[in-house]
Image: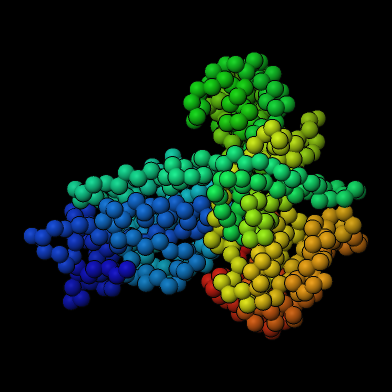
Amino acid sequence: MNMVHFIPETAPFNPDQRLWLNGYVAGLMAGKGFVPGVSDAGPARATVPLLVLFGSQTGTAEKLARQIAKEARPRGGNVEVMDAADHAKIEWAKETNLLVVTSTYGDGDMPDNAQGFWDWLQTDAARVLGHVRFSVLALGDTNYEHFCAAGKKIDARLEQLGAQRVNPLAECDVDYEAKSKEWMGGALAAFVPPNGGPANTAAPAAEAAAANGWSKTNPFSARLIANRCLNLDGSQKETRHFEISLGDSGLSYEAGDALGVWPANCPELVMDTLAALGCKGDEIVATAKGEMPLGKALGSVFDINKPGPELLKFFGERNPAMAALLALERKDDLKKWLLGRGVIDLLLENSSSRPSPGEFAALLKPIAPRLYSISSSPRAHAGRVHLTVNIVRYEAHGRARKGLASTFLADRAGAGTSVPVFFQASHGFRLPVSSDTSVVMVGPGTGVAPFRAFLHERRAVGAAGRNWLFFGEQRSATDFYYRDEIQKMQKDGHLTRLSTAFSRDQAEKIYVQHRMLENAAELWAWLEEGAHFYVCGDASRMAKDVDEALHKVIETAAGRGTEEAKAYVARMKSDKRYQRDVY
């Protein structure tokens, strides 16, 4: 996309001033329906050059970015959607209008594909954005401390660089549909005015998909057909393998995608919550799905596990001790207090000030779907999708606690209870285009899931590229998931290398990053030959440790300096050779 130059080169302005003025005038002209190069006497249709940049860890931000482009084009918008990882390919001096759609993951971190863009924004070169008009859509989860941090950082930095915010920052929780739709409307009005032509009234992507098939808002009621524990006797963990039949749904997926599961709350927890409220369950309350009995709403609509900010605020206004705990300077104390506590604990510990049924419903967050990395290949497991899930169960504060989705699958889904599902494409977590390319996969624990899918996929298509898997867990005897099939793949040569790290099998704890360093020379050789490097699992610790180990491998095996190693890893990311599925 090229910016039209309204300000002559001979005008008495420096380059930065000229860029800013060109962008400003372009915005004014677009708002009036003026199209450079088209006679005023002829039919004019606004063609506002608009760049939509997305930073996406799971694919949601990318979907929304493409949706706004889809809605803008019928209005005359000249729109281009780009992955933030490709920011270096953009001629930023020629851009005038920018929309950024980004998620946040980990401890307020940028998505992997947006990290390079964020790093560039910190440099002097980014001052070229001083002339840009912009708006940011931030995706997050209010259950986490650094809600929408990535989007907030980018929004603030663009303003600091002198860019003009023309549509307010939107901060979306996990139920992002309504707020993102509102933001899109504002963005379209600000950047792509319809100029008297018919505005596009297309429904959001999720609604459009629901009209034509299965989607997040119209999930398929699937049938759970297999449920077995992968751990052997003596294990301290409960990790299960699930198989779900897609029946005649027509749903399809690719290796690397995720399955969204809409869970229901534990009936026992629902009954205990009603008792703590002093309710019978037949009280009618308002929900996003319409009015319904409170008991039904607590079972399938509202999240009654981790308390959200609104519920905490409600009790903080009525309980001095809670109010003190909610003070900003005590956020660490609040985090410790909440550990192992749920909504029911707030009700029981504040029984003298419990809300009415209607108030309670208004204070709860809706149940959000859980996304699981798929552990099957559609070419090897036709009509089915496999999941590898760690089941959450523990005791805390005198009560048995259960993971909402994991125990829904483990305990309640089955012959009489369907599993509402949808697929989430993971465009940023894909096998190499060429089946001759080698792959290195690092997936401890349930992080092995997508790599089991990759291995089955590459066998099904006859991929000639080599495969190296790093897998780790607590104990080899009880926690070696899919041992038989992995070892069979190793024996027949499909799995070229297998490096395992069982942390509790020896006095010192050994993890996958240690195995990487032990095999630094060969790992470097694979990378130099063009191998793609994949990581799946915990973002807060494991993924960071593996990333640090990757840098050290390059430094030690290749004799590179710290900055050279950083540059090498950055190139891997830019070339889509370093991909992560982290949570």
| Quadrant in which the N terminus is drawn | bottom left
Please tell me which residue lies in front, 425 or 473: 425
Establish if 549 lies above or below 316.
below
Vertical side of 8 occupied by 426: above or below: above
Residue toward you, 395 or 45: 45
Percent of width and height locating residue 452: 71, 61
Residue at 79% across, 58% down: 482
- How many numbered callouts? 0
- Report x, y in % for residue 523: 72, 77
Position of residue 542 in the picture relative to residue 258 (left or right): right
**Residue in view at x 25 percent, y 51 percent:** 193
**Residue at the extreme front:** 248
Picture residue at 67% right of the left edge, 76% below the top? 465
- Colour mapping: rainbow
Reply above or below: 442 against 290: below
- Is residue 173 in sight in this rendering? no
Depth check: 424 or 126 in front? Answer: 424
Task: Classify residue 582 by image quadrant.
Answer: bottom right
- Expressed as whole percent of the image width and height from the top left, the position of residue 396 reads 78, 35
Q: Outermost residue, bottom direction?
A: 559
Which quadrant would residue 311 be assigned to in this image? top right
Q: Residue 510: x and y, percent?
A: 83, 64
The residue sitting at the left extreme is 41
Q: Identify the residue at horizontal 72%, vertical 51% (top origin).
A: 388
Residue 465 visible at all: yes
